[in-house]
Amino acid sequence: MFTGSKKFIWLAYLLAGTAVLQLTACGSSKTYGDVKFMTIPPGAQVVNLRDDANLGMTPVQVTWEGKDGKPEYVTVELTKKGYKNDITSFWVNTRHKTREAAAGEPQPVTVELQKRK
């Protein structure tokens, strides 16, 4: 088997490897945050400008996935026929450990759209 110094070196590698695995697992925990989009009047399309994803029509609640509770900066465009397009930016707080917890405490984002003349 292992003798004196070889046993110590093997044990040191084992402990270092375990520590790295634990730090890696802790550093990549998923967290969640929800935003409830509302417009005056309702019925506007919400588009995430980062990837042009259609997030739905207001009122709509959307879940964001983050890492380690770090906030995410989001920019969306709101469009509705007969109204000027509106672009708004905000921080999504991704502090919740589950989607369900985030859904229970959505951040409100309300925009009043301006009629076209």
Image (cartoon, grey):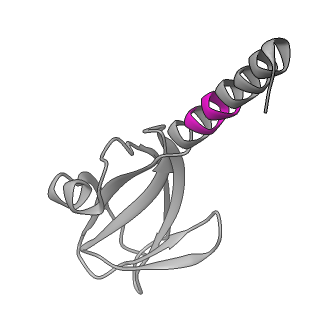
Residue 78 showing in the rendered view: yes
Number of marks in the rendered image = 0
- Front-most of residues 45 and 26: 26
Residue 20 drawn at (x, y percent): 66, 32
> Residue at 29% of width from left, 56% of height from top?
98
Magenta includes 93?
Answer: no
Residue 4 drawn at (x, y percent): 79, 13
> Residue at 77% of width from left, 26% of height from top?
10
Residue 117 showing in the rendered view: no
116 in relation to 37, above or below: below
Residue 36 drawn at (x, y percent): 26, 62
The quadrant of the image that shows the C terminus is bottom left
48 in relation to 17, above or below: below
> Residue at 42% of width from left, 75% of height from top?
116
Q: Quadrant of residue 2?
A: top right
Query: In this rendering, would 53 be left or right of 100?
Result: right
Spot the residue most to the top: 5
Query: In this rendering, would 104 be left or right of 117?
Result: left
- Front-most of residues 52 and 63: 63
Magenta includes 19?
Answer: yes
Magenta region, residue range: 17-22
The quadrant of the image that shows the N terminus is top right
> Residue at 65% of width from left, 25% of height from top?
15
Spot the residue most to the bottom: 81
- Front-most of residues 82 and 66: 66
Please identify the dominant SS of the magenta region.
helix
